[in-house]
Amino acid sequence: MILINAIFDVKETEFDNFLADINKLIDSSKQEAGCLSYELYQSTSSENRFVMIENWADQAAVEQHNQNPDLIAFAQSVGNYVTAKPVIHVTEVN
């Protein structure tokens, strides 16, 4: 299993745009083969911080996900929404 955590510090003025785009990505990602879970959480200590937690069956599922048009579009626009480059952690879980 592959676990991916992505941390986004979102500009207050961009909450609505960020959420609209990422919710589209979440909806399509959950339909992909090999997606075990794909959830977005908002920090309780910093309301501008969001954490995406993804669980994928294997590396092949992640590679297929990387071709998702909604992911590609989100990756191109995320810079408009955040105060810093997103932090992404990838872990293989046995």
Image: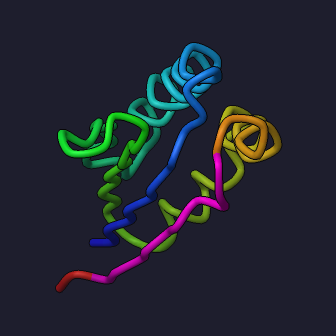
Main SS of the magenta segment? strand
Residue 72, how many percent across, how many down? 76, 44
Which image quadrant is residue 43 in? Answer: top left
Residue drawn at 35 percent across, 59 percent down: 56
Residue drawn at 51 percent across, 21 percent down: 19
Towards the viewer: 47 or 93: 47
Residue drawn at 39 percent across, 65 percent down: 4
**As drawn, 38 above or below 87:** above
Residue 73, how many percent across, how many down? 78, 35
Residue 16, how many percent across, how many down? 56, 13
Which image quadrant is residue 11 in? Answer: top right
Q: Quadrant of the C terminus?
A: bottom left
Relative to 4, 18 lies left or right: right
| Residue interval drawn in magenta | 83-92
Towards the viewer: 84 or 18: 84
Relative to 8, 17 lies left or right: right
Towards the viewer: 43 or 36: 43
- Examine the structure image and report whether residue 90 is included in the region drawn in magenta: yes
